[in-house]
Image: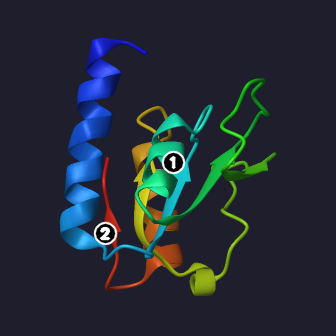
Amino acid sequence: MARVDRLRDNRVRTLIRQIVPSGGAVLEVSCGRAGLLGQLGGDGYAVRGTNFTAYNHSEKSVEIDNGVDVMVSLPYGTQIGAKVTIPHAGVSRVVKVTELRRLLGKRRVVIN
């Protein structure tokens, strides 16, 4: 993992610890191999990820919904329960804002 990725992951983990109590839910959109989610799961969070394409060698401890096209919508109602969502930087900002607002409602946090 590149140094920049490790620094970002450490910052995100610190923010999540400040916002979400242990055991809270975290959803990462376009999670790749789910390395960050694996770490958060080890910290005691309920984690879930999405990807458009399945990745080889993904984190085995993380539930990943593959085939999710965020340009259309996320396959969850507002009952997903995630307190924090981490959208991938490559996802269209307009789609992210609109879809994540629908998914998360008023009292949720998006870390980009």
Residue type at mark 1 is: Leu
Closer to the camera in the image, 20 or 93: 20
Image-based side of 13 in relation to 25, left or right: left
At x 60%, y 79%, the residue is 80
Residue 49 in the image, given as x and y percentages of width and height: 62, 52
Q: Nearer the viewer, mark 2 or mark 1?
A: 1
> Which mark, residue 112?
none
In this picture, is 27 found above or below 34?
A: below
Closer to the camera in the image, 34 or 100: 34
Total residue callouts: 2
> Which mark, residue 37?
1
Residue 45 in the image, given as x and y percentages of width and height: 46, 66
Image-based side of 94 in relation to 46, left or right: left
Q: Quadrant of the N terminus?
A: top left
| Label 2 residue SS | strand
Q: Which residue is mark 2?
A: 109
Residue 102 in the image, given as x and y percentages of width and height: 50, 77
